[in-house]
Amino acid sequence: MRRWLTAYAGGAALALVLAGCSAPAGIDRDLVDDWPAPVAAQQFVPAADVCHLTAQQVGFLTGYNPTACTESHLAETMHVGTLTGANAEPATPPQPGSAGMRAAQAGCGTVVNKAVGADWRSGRLGLTVVLPSPQAWAGGARWYRCDVSEIASIDDTTVGLRTGSLRGALSGAAPLAYRCFNPKLVKDDIDEMLPVSCTARHHAEFVGVWQAPEISYSAFTRSVQKTHRACQTMIAKYAKVPDNSQLEFRAGTIFYQPYEEEWRNGNRGVQCFLWISDRNLTRSMKSAGTKGLPVT
């Protein structure tokens, strides 16, 4: 309609000029300059500090329906970042294992760790990087969303409904933090880690997250002994015992490594546990020293 009016007005003004008539008062012969400039198109960017009833991996606008975190939800957006430079140049959103995906994963990890009060992998939390849809990316969207959820257990990453924000979830009393466990063994393999109070009888305790080196996943899975040794060092630091050849006789290790896709996306966090198979523990081994972890 606007184009039609502009063309029509131009033709009318030309007819007046040819007829030698002057314009009426208040008319400047240029109707086009009286139209407001069109508003620049705004690219949709999701909000941070909101929650969602559904968990997404692709941020389709049609599925975007944020809610207050005081309401029941599955995921919480703790941060919205922007991919820049070479990571923003591909024609499609970052694929698994790409530099862009690793950049988004690293950006989310840094912000989320600060928000929850510790490494997010040290408790019952899941972190999902949500990217724009291919259509939104083609339209210029370069955001990434950092969504955090509460998971069932270290063995079961099923996301459950919850109310309340996860900010500070791993600080203070931290009910979601990993602490003490009784491993369920099936043919010398860990079938399940059953969480228990550290004052109850138990045989394992979480000691921290080891950041594995930047190597291929296949190379990492072949270096089980190196991972075991790295977790031993974490045990020594956690329990305050010497990190020497006798450590092997103080405690064993259990560790959980990232899945291959997580590894390709930049997650190098290995969850380390001390393991005592031949006696019951009834207290935390944090700072227990050589009396708590004697050579046996």
Image: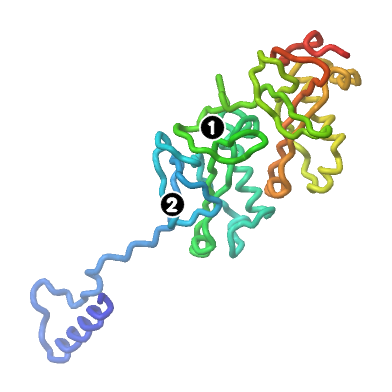
Comparing 10 with 105, the one in front is 105
Q: Is residue 145 above or below residue 60?
A: above
Q: Is residue 290 left or right of residue 146?
A: right
Q: Nearer the viewer, residue 132 or 251?
A: 251
* Residue at image location 48% in from the left, 35% down from the top: 162
- The type of residue carrying mark 2 is Tyr
The earlier-in-sequence mark between 2 and 1 is 2
> In the picture, which quadrant includes the C terminus?
top right
Residue 276 can be seen in this image: yes
Residue under numbered circle 2? 64
Amino acid type of the residue that numbered disc 1 sits on in the rendered structure: Ala
Q: Nearer the viewer, residue 181 or 143?
A: 181
Q: The N terminus appears in which quarter of the rendering?
A: bottom left
- Which residue corresponds to mark 1? 115
Residue shown at the point (58%, 59%) measured from the top left:
93
Instruction: Examine the image and state in which quarter residue 148 appears.
Output: top right
